[in-house]
Image (cartoon, helix red, strand yellow):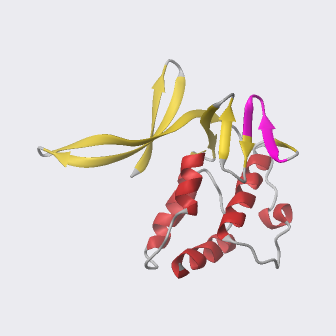
Amino acid sequence: MFIRTKKVNNNVYAYFVKNKWVDGKTSQTTVKYIGRVFPFKKTKNIDFMKFSGLEGKRVTNKELLQHLTEWELHNHGFVKEEKLWKKKEVVANAKTFSFLKGKKEVALGFNDGFLSKATLQRISRFTASSAEDGYKYAKYFVEAGIEVPQEVFVHMFKNVKRR
């Protein structure tokens, strides 16, 4: 399964799709709609450990994913107002993995990926059965537009291998 975008009336939409063979040809099937894509450029490049204040603290993978999400939002110019992150008409909640424009779920175009409820849920639900699953786990971060620091990724992957 991978992410595909489609342009409709000058708007870009993201979908999880999968390919399968039908009569000797590949056929693409939409698995899940992710949302309309709103691209944002990186405006800052702050070190994750300095931003998060997590150095030496024990946190769960879900908490780490929330901090990574907030870090990417911050680096892309979003401003935190109480518990929500805002930029233009988009409102993000890193705790619930919610990204809204009005009442509609959207995907944020970050770092050549798509930060959305669907991509973050895929990371948070991931379980690994072998070391080879590390590639797949890393791919999920890239597709979500999260430039996860190496030491954080290694820590998180060790935790998903233990599940």
Residue 18 higher or lower than 101, as above or below: below
Determine the residue located farthest toward the right in the rendered image: 82
Image coordinates of residue 85 in percent, x first then y, are: 79, 43
The residue at 68%/74% (across/down) is 151
Q: Residue furthest top?
A: 9
Left or right relative to 153: residue 48: right
147 and 128: which is toward the camera: 128
- Residue 103: quadrant of the picture: top right
Q: How many marks?
A: 0
- Outermost bottom residue: 162
- Residue at left 55%, top 51%? 119
Q: Is residue 96 left or right of residue 139?
A: right
Residue in the image at 54% along x and 48% along y: 118
Q: Main secondary structure of the magenta part?
A: strand
Q: Position of residue 8 (x, y in %)?
A: 47, 22
Establish if 163 lies above or below 65: below
Question: Which quarter of the picture shows residue 104?
Answer: top right
- Depth order, front residue of 55/34: 34
Q: Residue at x 58, y 79 (%)?
A: 158
Residue 110: percent from left, percent from top? 64, 44
Which residues fall within the magenta stretch?
Answer: 83-91
Is 89 included in the stretch rendered in magenta?
yes
Q: Is residue 68 magenta?
A: no
Left or right: 81, with 146 as reference point: right
Q: Position of residue 128 (x, y in %)?
A: 47, 74
